[in-house]
Image: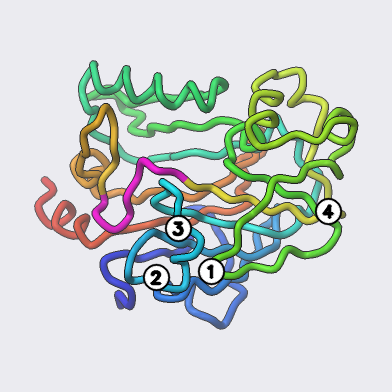
Amino acid sequence: MWPDRPLLVRESVLHGTTRTSEKPPISLASPLPFDFTTSLFQGQMFLRYNSDRQPASAPYFQGKKRLQSVVITGRFKREVPFADLLTGQEFCHNIKSPGAILSKALLGAIKVLAPLLNCRIAPPGDPDHSSYFVSPLAQTVQKLRVSEEPFPLSAAVDVEEDTRLLGGKLADKPMDDKERRKFFASKSNLAAYSFGTELYCTFDFYNDKIDFESWEFALLGKKFALERYLLGQPVRVLARAGESAEYAWNFEVWHEKQTHTLATAD
Protein backbone atom coordinates (compact mmCIF):
# COMPACT_ATOMS: atom_id res chain seq x y z
CA MET A 1 0.00 0.00 0.00
CA TRP A 2 1.45 3.35 -1.08
CA PRO A 3 -1.20 6.04 -0.41
CA ASP A 4 0.93 9.18 -0.86
CA ARG A 5 3.24 8.70 -3.82
CA PRO A 6 6.02 9.49 -4.34
CA LEU A 7 6.77 9.42 -0.56
CA LEU A 8 6.06 6.86 2.11
CA VAL A 9 6.66 7.57 5.80
CA ARG A 10 6.54 4.87 8.46
CA GLU A 11 7.94 3.91 11.83
CA SER A 12 11.19 2.04 11.61
CA VAL A 13 10.66 -1.72 11.67
CA LEU A 14 14.09 -2.15 13.22
CA HIS A 15 13.83 -0.39 16.55
CA GLY A 16 10.41 -1.03 18.03
CA THR A 17 8.54 2.26 17.68
CA THR A 18 4.92 1.51 18.64
CA ARG A 19 2.03 3.07 16.79
CA THR A 20 -0.69 4.36 19.13
CA SER A 21 -2.85 6.39 16.73
CA GLU A 22 -5.77 5.05 14.72
CA LYS A 23 -4.92 7.58 11.99
CA PRO A 24 -2.62 6.68 9.11
CA PRO A 25 1.07 7.05 10.09
CA ILE A 26 1.17 10.42 8.38
CA SER A 27 -1.01 12.20 5.84
CA LEU A 28 1.25 13.89 3.33
CA ALA A 29 -1.62 15.65 1.57
CA SER A 30 -2.55 17.38 4.83
CA PRO A 31 0.10 16.81 7.50
CA LEU A 32 -2.01 15.84 10.48
CA PRO A 33 -0.15 15.03 13.70
CA PHE A 34 0.66 11.38 14.21
CA ASP A 35 0.58 10.12 17.82
CA PHE A 36 3.40 7.81 18.87
CA THR A 37 5.04 6.45 21.98
CA THR A 38 8.38 4.77 22.73
CA SER A 39 10.18 3.77 25.89
CA LEU A 40 11.68 7.29 26.04
CA PHE A 41 9.09 9.68 24.61
CA GLN A 42 5.38 10.21 24.04
CA GLY A 43 4.11 12.79 21.62
CA GLN A 44 3.17 13.70 18.08
CA MET A 45 4.98 14.30 14.80
CA PHE A 46 4.29 15.33 11.24
CA LEU A 47 6.28 15.85 8.07
CA ARG A 48 5.72 18.65 5.61
CA TYR A 49 7.53 19.44 2.39
CA ASN A 50 7.38 22.35 -0.03
CA SER A 51 5.11 20.95 -2.71
CA ASP A 52 1.76 21.49 -4.40
CA ARG A 53 0.87 18.10 -2.90
CA GLN A 54 0.70 19.81 0.51
CA PRO A 55 -1.26 23.04 -0.02
CA ALA A 56 -2.02 23.35 3.71
CA SER A 57 1.72 23.78 4.41
CA ALA A 58 2.21 26.56 1.85
CA PRO A 59 2.00 29.42 4.41
CA TYR A 60 4.83 27.86 6.41
CA PHE A 61 7.20 27.73 3.43
CA GLN A 62 6.30 31.12 1.97
CA GLY A 63 9.34 33.40 1.92
CA LYS A 64 11.67 30.66 3.21
CA LYS A 65 14.37 28.63 1.47
CA ARG A 66 13.33 25.51 3.39
CA LEU A 67 12.42 22.39 1.42
CA GLN A 68 11.02 20.24 4.21
CA SER A 69 10.25 20.24 7.92
CA VAL A 70 9.63 17.54 10.51
CA VAL A 71 8.02 18.70 13.75
CA ILE A 72 7.96 16.54 16.88
CA THR A 73 6.40 17.56 20.18
CA GLY A 74 5.75 15.81 23.50
CA ARG A 75 7.39 14.77 26.77
CA PHE A 76 10.23 12.47 27.72
CA LYS A 77 9.41 9.53 29.97
CA ARG A 78 12.70 9.70 31.86
CA GLU A 79 15.45 12.25 32.22
CA VAL A 80 17.85 12.22 29.26
CA PRO A 81 21.10 14.23 29.37
CA PHE A 82 21.60 16.59 26.46
CA ALA A 83 24.97 15.02 25.76
CA ASP A 84 23.36 11.59 25.45
CA LEU A 85 20.51 12.36 23.03
CA LEU A 86 21.71 12.08 19.43
CA THR A 87 20.08 12.77 16.08
CA GLY A 88 21.18 12.33 12.48
CA GLN A 89 21.31 9.44 10.03
CA GLU A 90 22.02 5.73 10.57
CA PHE A 91 22.34 3.04 7.93
CA CYS A 92 22.36 -0.70 8.54
CA HIS A 93 23.99 -1.52 5.21
CA ASN A 94 26.63 0.00 2.99
CA ILE A 95 26.06 3.40 1.46
CA LYS A 96 27.85 4.67 -1.61
CA SER A 97 30.53 7.26 -0.97
CA PRO A 98 30.17 10.33 -3.22
CA GLY A 99 33.95 10.37 -3.64
CA ALA A 100 36.74 11.99 -1.67
CA ILE A 101 36.14 15.57 -2.80
CA LEU A 102 32.38 15.54 -2.27
CA SER A 103 32.71 13.60 1.00
CA LYS A 104 35.10 16.21 2.35
CA ALA A 105 32.80 19.03 1.24
CA LEU A 106 29.74 17.29 2.70
CA LEU A 107 31.36 16.62 6.07
CA GLY A 108 32.74 20.14 6.15
CA ALA A 109 29.30 21.62 5.54
CA ILE A 110 27.74 19.43 8.24
CA LYS A 111 30.41 20.26 10.81
CA VAL A 112 29.81 23.98 10.38
CA LEU A 113 26.31 23.39 11.77
CA ALA A 114 27.14 20.35 13.90
CA PRO A 115 30.72 20.71 15.23
CA LEU A 116 30.26 17.70 17.56
CA LEU A 117 29.41 15.39 14.64
CA ASN A 118 30.37 11.73 15.04
CA CYS A 119 30.43 9.93 11.71
CA ARG A 120 31.46 6.71 10.02
CA ILE A 121 31.24 5.60 6.39
CA ALA A 122 31.90 1.87 6.20
CA PRO A 123 34.74 1.18 3.75
CA PRO A 124 34.22 -1.46 1.03
CA GLY A 125 34.78 -4.96 2.34
CA ASP A 126 34.34 -4.01 6.00
CA PRO A 127 32.31 -6.76 7.76
CA ASP A 128 30.59 -4.01 9.77
CA HIS A 129 28.41 -2.45 7.08
CA SER A 130 26.93 0.25 9.33
CA SER A 131 27.45 3.93 8.59
CA TYR A 132 26.21 6.89 10.62
CA PHE A 133 26.26 10.67 11.00
CA VAL A 134 25.03 11.66 14.47
CA SER A 135 25.41 14.64 16.80
CA PRO A 136 23.77 15.98 19.98
CA LEU A 137 20.16 16.88 19.23
CA ALA A 138 20.13 19.97 21.48
CA GLN A 139 22.99 21.45 19.47
CA THR A 140 21.78 20.65 15.96
CA VAL A 141 17.96 20.89 15.89
CA GLN A 142 16.93 24.02 14.01
CA LYS A 143 14.22 25.14 16.45
CA LEU A 144 13.64 24.08 20.06
CA ARG A 145 10.72 25.20 22.19
CA VAL A 146 10.14 24.18 25.81
CA SER A 147 6.76 24.82 27.42
CA GLU A 148 4.62 23.88 30.40
CA GLU A 149 1.62 23.07 28.22
CA PRO A 150 1.31 20.90 25.08
CA PHE A 151 2.25 22.71 21.87
CA PRO A 152 -0.60 22.62 19.31
CA LEU A 153 0.46 21.39 15.88
CA SER A 154 -0.94 22.51 12.54
CA ALA A 155 0.24 22.37 8.94
CA ALA A 156 1.39 26.00 8.90
CA VAL A 157 2.66 26.35 12.47
CA ASP A 158 6.02 28.10 12.90
CA VAL A 159 7.90 26.83 15.96
CA GLU A 160 9.43 29.80 17.79
CA GLU A 161 12.61 29.23 19.79
CA ASP A 162 12.08 29.41 23.57
CA THR A 163 14.36 27.53 25.97
CA ARG A 164 14.03 29.69 29.10
CA LEU A 165 12.32 26.95 31.12
CA LEU A 166 15.47 24.82 30.87
CA GLY A 167 16.98 27.15 33.46
CA GLY A 168 20.57 28.11 34.09
CA LYS A 169 22.13 30.44 31.53
CA LEU A 170 19.21 29.84 29.19
CA ALA A 171 16.92 31.49 31.74
CA ASP A 172 19.36 34.26 32.64
CA LYS A 173 19.76 35.36 29.02
CA PRO A 174 17.15 34.11 26.54
CA MET A 175 18.83 32.79 23.41
CA ASP A 176 17.69 32.58 19.81
CA ASP A 177 18.26 29.38 17.84
CA LYS A 178 21.70 30.40 16.56
CA GLU A 179 22.89 31.37 20.04
CA ARG A 180 21.58 28.10 21.49
CA ARG A 181 23.40 26.02 18.85
CA LYS A 182 26.62 27.91 19.52
CA PHE A 183 26.18 27.52 23.29
CA PHE A 184 25.70 23.76 23.06
CA ALA A 185 28.65 23.32 20.72
CA SER A 186 30.56 23.18 24.03
CA LYS A 187 30.61 19.74 25.64
CA SER A 188 30.73 21.31 29.10
CA ASN A 189 27.52 23.26 28.40
CA LEU A 190 25.82 20.12 27.09
CA ALA A 191 26.81 18.24 30.25
CA ALA A 192 24.97 20.76 32.43
CA TYR A 193 21.49 20.15 30.96
CA SER A 194 18.97 17.35 30.60
CA PHE A 195 15.55 16.82 29.05
CA GLY A 196 13.21 16.25 32.00
CA THR A 197 9.81 14.60 32.26
CA GLU A 198 7.61 17.53 33.32
CA LEU A 199 8.06 19.96 30.42
CA TYR A 200 6.88 19.65 26.81
CA CYS A 201 9.57 19.86 24.14
CA THR A 202 8.89 20.80 20.52
CA PHE A 203 11.50 20.28 17.81
CA ASP A 204 11.44 21.56 14.22
CA PHE A 205 13.97 19.78 12.01
CA TYR A 206 14.09 21.62 8.69
CA ASN A 207 16.64 22.12 5.92
CA ASP A 208 17.14 23.50 2.45
CA LYS A 209 19.43 20.75 1.16
CA ILE A 210 17.24 17.65 0.85
CA ASP A 211 14.28 17.81 -1.52
CA PHE A 212 11.89 15.01 -0.60
CA GLU A 213 9.76 15.39 -3.72
CA SER A 214 12.62 15.10 -6.23
CA TRP A 215 14.67 12.90 -3.83
CA GLU A 216 17.81 14.99 -4.36
CA PHE A 217 20.31 16.73 -2.10
CA ALA A 218 22.13 19.94 -2.96
CA LEU A 219 25.86 20.44 -2.47
CA LEU A 220 28.38 22.82 -4.02
CA GLY A 221 25.71 24.28 -6.29
CA LYS A 222 24.79 20.87 -7.74
CA LYS A 223 22.01 18.35 -7.10
CA PHE A 224 22.59 14.65 -6.51
CA ALA A 225 20.12 11.75 -6.65
CA LEU A 226 19.73 10.30 -3.16
CA GLU A 227 18.87 6.80 -4.39
CA ARG A 228 22.34 6.47 -5.95
CA TYR A 229 24.00 6.83 -2.57
CA LEU A 230 21.52 5.33 -0.08
CA LEU A 231 21.39 2.02 -1.97
CA GLY A 232 17.84 1.11 -1.06
CA GLN A 233 17.82 2.61 2.44
CA PRO A 234 15.56 5.36 3.82
CA VAL A 235 16.26 8.80 5.19
CA ARG A 236 15.78 8.63 8.95
CA VAL A 237 14.07 10.94 11.41
CA LEU A 238 15.48 9.75 14.71
CA ALA A 239 16.59 10.58 18.22
CA ARG A 240 18.62 8.03 20.15
CA ALA A 241 19.96 7.92 23.70
CA GLY A 242 23.57 6.99 23.01
CA GLU A 243 24.44 5.04 26.14
CA SER A 244 21.27 2.94 26.24
CA ALA A 245 20.73 2.74 22.45
CA GLU A 246 17.03 3.48 23.11
CA TYR A 247 15.16 5.52 20.54
CA ALA A 248 12.95 8.44 21.52
CA TRP A 249 11.65 8.24 17.94
CA ASN A 250 12.72 6.55 14.74
CA PHE A 251 10.84 7.09 11.47
CA GLU A 252 11.75 6.28 7.89
CA VAL A 253 11.16 8.38 4.77
CA TRP A 254 11.08 6.45 1.48
CA HIS A 255 10.69 7.57 -2.13
CA GLU A 256 9.35 5.48 -4.99
CA LYS A 257 12.65 6.01 -6.85
CA GLN A 258 14.17 3.58 -4.37
CA THR A 259 11.96 0.77 -5.60
CA HIS A 260 13.98 0.78 -8.83
CA THR A 261 17.22 0.73 -6.82
CA LEU A 262 16.02 -2.29 -4.85
CA ALA A 263 14.78 -4.09 -7.96
CA THR A 264 18.13 -3.72 -9.73
CA ALA A 265 20.36 -4.39 -6.70
CA ASP A 266 22.79 -7.31 -6.96
Q: Residue at x 24, y 31 (%)?
A: 221
Residue that extends furthest to the front in the rendered view of this protein: 63
Real-space Cα separation, disc 4 to disc 2, in angstroms: 31 Å
| Callout 1: SS | loop
Numbered tag placed on residue 62 in the rendering: 3
Real-space Cα separation, disc 3 to disc 2, in angstroms: 13 Å
Q: Residue at x 38, y 40 (%)?
A: 91
Real-space Cα separation, disc 3 to disc 4, in angstroms: 31 Å
The residue that label 4 is drawn on is 199
Quick one: label 3 or label 2, which is nearer the N terminus? 2
Numbered tag placed on residue 208 in the rendering: none
The residue that label 2 is drawn on is 54
**Residue 82 is covered by the magenta coloring:** no
Quick one: label 4 or label 2, which is nearer the N terminus? 2
Q: Nearer the viewer, residue 61 or 245?
A: 61
Q: Which residues are magenta?
A: 207-215
In the rendered image, which quarter is residue 17 located in? Answer: bottom right
Q: Nearer the viewer, residue 194 or 217?
A: 217
